[in-house]
Structures are given as C-alpha cells and as structure tokens.
Amino acid sequence: MAYDKFNILTSTAVPLPLENVDTDQIIPARFLKATERKGFGDNLFRDWRYNGDNTPKESFVLNNPIYGGKILVGGKNFGSGSSREHAAWAIYDYGFRCVVSSFFADIFRNNCLNVGVLPVQVSPEFSEQIFNAIYENPNTEIEINLTNQTITILSTGAQESFEINSYKKDNMLNGFDDIDYLQNIKGEIENFANSLLL
C-alpha cells in the first residue's frame, strides 16, 4: 500500500510530554480486531481521550482545540511495550505524519517507517525547546525536511539534524512501502533472474 510522499512537512504540533508511552496506551489491545489499516485513528489514545461513557476528557491534549497539526511531539521512550504495528496505524490514521521524541522504541520506529509516519529523534535539549515553543505559542510551526534530515522550529530558527536509514528514507520520499519498492524494481529483478538462466 503506497503512502503520501514525504519531503518537507511544515505544520503546527501537538505536545504530549509524557515519558514511556507504550503501544497499549497508543491503541488499547481491545481495538486490535480489525485487519485493515483503517479506523484505528478513532481509538488513538482511547483511554486517555475518553471517559467510560465515551465523553471526551477535556484535560487530554487531543481534545484541546488550541493544539493541532500533523506532528505529534512525545516524551522520551515513545512507543515502548509490545510490537503491535497497530500503534503506528492509529497514529497515521488519525492524521499525524511525524512523531518527534528524544528516544523511540526500535520496533515502533520501524513500524512507523513502514506505514508512512516519520519518527524524528532529537536530543533531550532540543525536545525541551520544541515543547517550550509550542506552549508559548500553539501556532508555532515545525519544519521537517526529510531530504536534508533536519527539524526546525520556525519561530526561533533553532534546528537539529536527525538520522534515518537510507532505504527507509528513499521509500518515504517516494511514498513506498516494502512491497511498492519491490514492484518499482520488478524489471531489475526479472533481468537478474533471467541472467541466471543463461
């Protein structure tokens, strides 16, 4: 399944400065019955977003109208816990295209890259700058430049570089998942296979 091409994303951001956010908090296990990647956004952070009677919790950031955008800024150790890929599906389906944190769980990071969500790991100091900028002005925009591998707080000009696997970077730039990548080089694969038969 192809995803939106990712080159430069400029957006406001939603702050979630909680450490050790695990995949069961991102998408509770009781919502993992579906096999398609659609509809999970409705239950993103379900137990934090809603009361038992399904009314929104006013205190949770996703229910606060002053915050919005395609970037989620999380605390340290974001995406820990189980390996469920549904957590990345829920984040994408909700509308986020980038998650920023000072540390990601490895499996969660890879799951995000597989579905078109860019995980940007920054230093703790830069993470704090981002949170401060958003709290000072919720309309603060963050620029994520995948080609240059930089993240910039546009209101201050503060910038930091981030790392990404070159294969995953190329896929994100082209909007490919792993299957799309193989389809894109199908001709090369066939030529190579034919060369073995000669």
Image: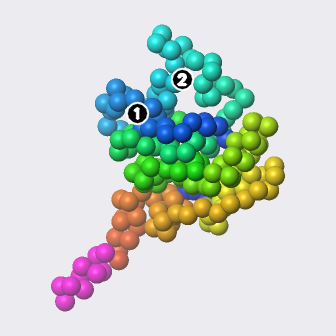
- Give coordinates of residue 180: x percent, y percent: 40, 60
Q: In front: mark 2 or mark 1? A: 1
Tag 1 or tag 2, which sits nearer the N-term? 1
Q: Residue 148's image quarter?
A: bottom right
Q: Does the magenta stretch include residue 96?
A: no
Tell me the distance, in whole angstroms, between the alpha carbons under discs 2 and 1: 14 Å
> Which stretch did the figure color magenta?
189-198
Q: Is 136 situated above or below 146? A: above
Residue at the far right: name it: 156
Label 1, secondary structure: give it.
Answer: helix
Q: Residue 83 carries which label?
A: none
Q: Residue 24 carries which label?
A: 1
Residue at the far top: name it: 53
Evaluate whether residue 91 shows in this view: no
- Give coordinates of residue 47: x percent, y percent: 47, 23
Amino acid under label 2? Arg
The answer to which of 179 and 65 lies nearer the viewer is: 65
Graded by Cα atoms within 10 Å as few (under 14), some (14 to 19) or many (20 or more), the crowding at tag 1 reads: many
Q: Residue 157's image quarter?
A: bottom right
Q: Please, what is the dominant secondary structure of the magenta stretch?
A: helix
Evaluate whether residue 134 shows in this view: yes
Q: Does the magenta stretch include residue 196?
A: yes
Label 2, secondary structure: give it.
Answer: helix
Amino acid under label 1? Asp
Identify the residue at horizontal 68%, vertical 60% (top origin): 160
Q: Residue 49 carries which label?
A: 2
